[in-house]
Amino acid sequence: MSFDRSVKIAPSILSADFANFGAEIRAIEDQGADWVHVDVMDGHFVPNLTFGPPAVKAFRPHVKTFMDVHLMIAPVDPYIEAYAEAGADMITAHVEAGPHIHRTLQAIKATGKMAGVSLNPGTPLESIEHVLDLVDMVLIMTVNPGFGGQKFIHSGVEKTRRLRAMIGDRPIHIQIDGGVTPETAPLVVEAGADVLVAGSAVFKGGSVDSPEVYGENMRAIRDAVKHLSA
Ligand code: DX5
Ligand code: ZN
């Protein structure tokens, strides 16, 4: 089977109702989410705090698609196993989250999970050149990590284009995270991205009582990119 480069939408539950995660996850999946993106923050690597391994483990039974765990924590190595055991399908770590990104990615692979590496807006593409053969996904941040609802940083578009060329035929997903909307999604999909994280753009205006709004929001993103899709 050839590698799936079709566009996938990964709603970030950072924008969900924090008192109702199980129902929120079911709602976005019922409405067509391809993956569920879980933003883990430590109040140190980024100025915000979110989910420890027990919270992620509690999300797991509700996720029927694919649980994509984005670790914005440093040091990251001591916690990889705990997030793997909590049930992540993909674990993504930032280049700056430990002294040795190569070792971090080896540790993720050793758990049997898929491995992602993330680049902040200021992190050069060259920093991952020598670890590409270890990863299943590269995450390009198009905001500085820490909060939902920030404005898309446009330098990520050219970075995505260069990354796509660097990846060539390798089976590596390109994920974009931060400020993805129906307006910005076509820019990064045209440049080569296939996984779109979206928090506020998916959850805005909806709730578990009006989940069809999540569906409409996701459809607006898909419609905006469908003429570009691989
Ligand atoms: C930011 C997180 C994102 C965030 C995206 O640090 O990694 O996943 O939730 O939110 P929006 O789509 O609202 O920019
Ligand atoms: Zn994220």
Image (tube, rainbow, N blue to C red):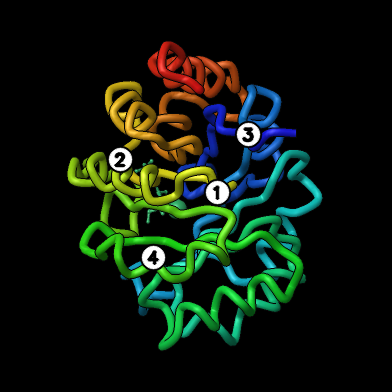
Is label 3 or label 4 in front?
Answer: 4
At x 43%, y 84%, the residue is 98
Earlier-in-chain disc, 2 versus 4: 4
> Is ligand 2 less than 8 Å from the beta carbon at label 3?
no
Q: Which residue is mark 3?
A: 4
Earlier-in-chain disc, 1 versus 2: 2
Earlier-in-chain disc, 2 versus 3: 3
Q: Which residue is mark 1?
A: 170
Q: Which residue is mark 4?
A: 129
Earlier-in-chain disc, 3 versus 4: 3
**Image height check: is 44 above or below 212?**
below
Disc 4 crowd, CA 10 A, few/some/many (<14, 14-19, 20+): few
- Callout 4 secondary element: loop
**Image height check: is 14 above or below 34?**
below
Q: Whole-Å distance between the Cαs marked 1 and 2?
A: 15 Å
The amino acid beneath tag 1 is Arg
- Callout 1 secondary element: loop
Query: Which residue appears farthest toward the front when viewing the image?
Result: 169
The amino acid beneath tag 4 is Glu
Q: Whole-Å distance between the Cαs marked 3 and 4?
A: 22 Å
Residues under numbered marks 2 and 4 in contact, where contact means CB atoms less than 8 Å apart: no
Please provide percent x and percent y for residue 223: 44, 12
Please provide percent x and percent y for residue 45: 36, 76
Q: Whole-Å distance between the Cαs marked 2 and 4?
A: 15 Å
Q: Whole-Å distance between the Cαs marked 4 and 1?
A: 13 Å
